[in-house]
Amino acid sequence: MASKYISIKEAADLTDKSPQTIRRLIKSKKIDCRKYKTPQGFNYEVGKESIVEFYNLEASAAAVAEQPIEAKTEVKEVQQLLKDRDHKIIVEYAPVKEFNNTLQMLLKQHAQEKENLFKLVEAFQNKVVSLETKMKVADSESSRWYKFW
C-alpha cells in the first residue's frame, strides 16, 4: 500500500516545482503536511492527495510517480554504452597528454627561474657584505688616534 505522505523532495519532483515552492505552500497552509522531530530538527512530509488536488494533477501522473523505477536497459545497451564511454576516453586522451606536456615544460621553466633568482639574491648579498666591509675599513682609516688635531 502506498504511503499517504511523501517527502518535500518527492512532492517537488511530482509537481516539477522546486522544494522551496513546496515549503512556501506548507508555510502558507495551502497543502496538508505533517511535521516530525529528528535529532537535527524537524522534517515535513506532504500529503500526496493535497498536492495532487492543489496542482490539479491527473491521477495517472500520481500513479506513475508511485511506481518503482525498473531497469529497462538490456545487456547489449549497456555494452554499447561502455564502448562509447571507452571511445570518449581515448578521444579525450590526446588533449590531456598535450596539457600534461605543457605543464611539465612550465614546471621546468619555473625551476630554472627559481634557481636564477636564488643566484641573484646570493650575488646581491655578497655585494652588500663587500660594501659593508669597505665602509668599515674606510671608517677605521679616518678615525686614527694620532689624527686628532
Image (spheres, rainbow, N blue to C red):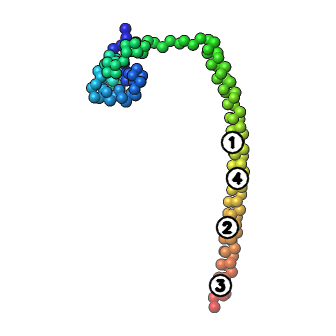
User: What amino acid is found at the position of numbered circle 3 in the picture?
Assistant: Trp
> Where does label 4 land, which residue?
113
In this picture, residue 87 sits left or right of residue 6: right
Identify residue for label 1: 103
Mark sitting on residue 49? none
Disc 2 versus disc 3: nearer the observer: 2
- The residue type indicated by label 1 comes to Leu
| Foreground: disc 1 or disc 3 | 1
Task: Tell me what residue is drawn at x 67 percent, y 27 percent.
Answer: 89
Q: Residues within 10 Å of mark 3 (few under 14, many from 20)?
A: few
Q: Amino acid at mark 2?
A: Val
| Residue 56 quadrant | top left
User: Distance of mark 3 from mark 4, alpha carbons?
Assistant: 51 Å
Q: For numbered disc 2, what is the local secondary structure? A: helix
**Residue of label 2:** 128
Residue most toward the bottom? 149
Indicate which disc, 1 or 4, sits on the residue closer to the N terminus: 1
Residue indicated by mark 3: 145
